[in-house]
Amino acid sequence: MIVVTGATGNIGRPLTRALADAGEQVTAVSRHVAEVPDGVRHQVADLARPETLPLAGAKALFLLLSGDLHAAGADPADVVRQAVAAGVRRVVLLSTLGVKTRPFGATRIAMSALEDVVRESGTDWAILRPGGFASNALWWAESVRANRVVAAPFGDTGVPILDPADIAEVAAACLTDDRHNGAVHELTGPEVITPREQAAAIAAALGEPVRFHELTRAEAKAGMEQLMPGELADDTLDILSSPTPDELRVSPDVQAVLGRAPRSFADWAARNVEAFR
């Protein structure tokens, strides 16, 4: 059995489906009751309380922390320890490229420490470090639906954003293929793409014009603080405004693992166009 945490999100959902389609027994874990593919077991659990995780009999664990990393009193390392105690033989951790590119922020220091816990756990392991997600464009869905406008800062500064479906496929390979034991995969999309170019790709998928409106940094931060802590908003805006050479680098790792190039943002937009109609 393979346990997938964050199983209802942009990565966990396609990962759960891919594993089930490959004939694996899968337990999908999320904080709330959710629909899962036929044949997949679902369990509500809280990563801040590792004892609630259904790890008995599991051979592998996909660990996606999301907000649990910041939960008061939570220690994500306890999840790894619980997995080891339950006899889990493989852990695949979803980390972040920021561990390498901007290692001194509080959340990245914590994630780096968790990477070390996974490495030293005695299990087989793999670590995935994705950059920016194409699915972050869903933040614009309401304004595109209502006004056919994308509002974002730094319109002509881009990074090689990544389709979450590619992360899911790489994770599935790491959970089921011994060749990835001990690997740290840096995951990006196939090319640098700016917010203005993303708006054009959404317009092409819709077959209708979409206007781009450039926000100031202050305007962008005010909106982002409705969804995340101010420190994290500032970190994100720092990357979007002045990406480092490592953040602009197109990684070969998706191609190396999957035997094909990463999906483009245009492909993601075409598959998710109904969110913008």
Image (cartoon, grey):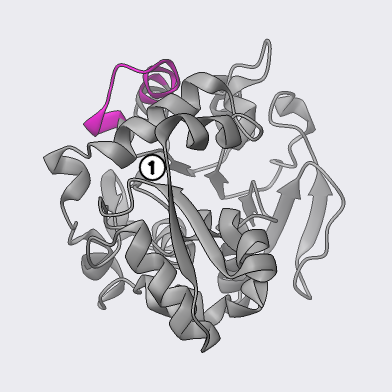
- Screen quadrant of the C terminus: bottom right
- Residue 122 in view here: no
- What is the secondary structure assignment of the residue under circle 1? strand
Instruction: Look at the magenta stretch and give its main secondary structure.
Output: helix
Is 39 one of the magenta-colored residues? no
Tell me residue 252's x, y (percent): 17, 62
Which residue reaches farthest bottom? 207
Q: Quadrant of residue 71?
A: top right
**For this rendering, which residue is in front, 39 or 210?**
210
Q: Start and end of the magenta stretch?
A: 99-113
| 184 vs 35: above or below | above
Q: Residue at x 45, y 49 (%)?
A: 152
Which residue is labeled 1 in the image? 125
| 174 vs 165: above or below | above
Tell me residue 258's x, y (percent): 31, 72
Instruction: Describe residue 159's horizontal placement relative to residue 271 as left or right.
Output: left
Is 100 one of the magenta-colored residues? yes
- Residue 175 in view here: yes
Instruction: Describe residue 34's horizontal placement relative to residue 11 as left or right.
Output: right
Tell me residue 148's x, y (percent): 58, 70
